[in-house]
Image (cartoon, grey):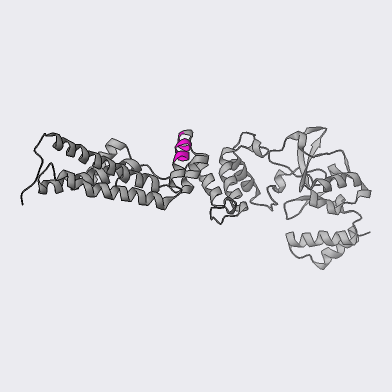
Amino acid sequence: MKDKNTPCCESEWWVNLVISFALVAFASITSGLSLGLLSHSKVDLEVLIKSGVPREQKNAAKVLPIVKNEILLLCTLFIAKSLTMEALPIFMDRILPFWSAILVSMTFVVAFVEVIPQAICSRYGLLSYPVRKVLDWLLGKNHSAILRRAELKTYVDLHGIKAGKGGDLTDDETTIIAGAMNMTQKTAKDAMTPMSRTFSLDINSKLELQTMGMVASKGHSRVPIYSDDPANIIGLILVKSLIFYHPEDETPIRDMTIRRILRVYDNWPLYDVLKLFQKDSEPTETDGIGINPPLGEKELLNNSSVYHGDGEIQSDSLYDGMKESDLSLFLNKWEQDCGQISNEELESLKGKYIR
């Protein structure tokens, strides 16, 4: 078969050569765009828009309208790529012999349409070892798909039910995940309540009806106790322990069980503070974030204080003249913390405390 080639260096030969290179370049662009655009989902782009660096936010905002209709984009790029690849051998055949046109067009398609564009657009070339080393040298090492902290938080938010993207994470779940991630960037100061907003009681005050009403209205499980100056916090009392006190007795707060509190610097990382609380509360019973230190770390307030198995110090004077209903509540708590109470112990308590 005789080749019908255009003589070299004539105007028609140059036109066919330019068209061939243009087809290769256009096919390379469509191949790179098909991988570069379709490798990012709409969720990925929304994450970059909300949490990426300014340059990424700007670029993602431009790309998102294009990739919203993925099927149309995919068909457009594939049809354009197919047309250019089919047309390339026709024009190559006019400037080269038949057999060389096939080899050259195939080489151009593999190298400049498939391998190089996809390696450039994705920074990840699925190539044999020698070619991969060359691309790594030219383009840099492969980039992993690890998200930054802000991007990961946004990614979690977009998987929530509230985002309306089809995710099934509840608001509580997304809030907990985001809170756990935020803790690494927060210090103890971020979790502290300013002294001006803290409800506390003076150790010299009495547990009268008005005071107990204020404590109940605040809704706190613990109330700080100060001495003279509100900034001089010396400990705290458990609100649940007030069930054993009667307002008419006007029990001095200094006669109550005052528990020691941990002291930390406001610049400590919040996770370190949490670990400190967990470590300090291991030997004893805990309630929420507060701790029950062992006896050696307590403030002993009077000589009649006694230590119970729940890690608290109780004073005999707290239960003088206790009513039988109140004693029942106390005994139920004691049974939970210390085990069964013998009949002898029960009769002894009744004789000592019941009016």
Residue 275 occupies quadrant? top right
**Most common SS among magenta residues:** helix
In-front residue for pair 160/354: 160
Residue 12 in the image: state x and y as whole percent: 15, 37
Q: Residue at x 57, y 55 (%)?
A: 169
Judge whether 330 appears above or below 85 on screen.
below
In-front residue for pair 349/259: 259
Q: Residue at x 10, y 40 (%)?
A: 6
Magenta-drawn stretch contains 56: yes
Q: How many marks?
A: 0
* The residue positioned farthest toward the bottom in the image shown: 343
Q: Residue at x 61, y 33 (%)?
A: 267
Asked if residue 141 lies left or right of residue 194, the reply is left
Residue 234 in the image: state x and y as whole percent: 76, 38
Asked if residue 46 lies left or right of residue 221, the reply is left
Residue 196 in the image: state x and y as whole percent: 77, 34
Residue 218 in the image: state x and y as whole percent: 80, 45
Tell me if I can see residue 124 in this picture. Answer: no
In-front residue for pair 50/136: 50
In-front residue for pair 302/254: 254
Instruction: Report the magenta residues as a range.
Output: 55-62
Magenta-drawn stretch contains 313: no
Asked if residue 209 lies left or right of residue 156, the reply is right
Tell me if I can see residue 226 in this picture. Answer: yes
Asked if residue 123 lies left or right of residue 68, the reply is left
Q: Quadrant of the C terminus?
A: bottom right
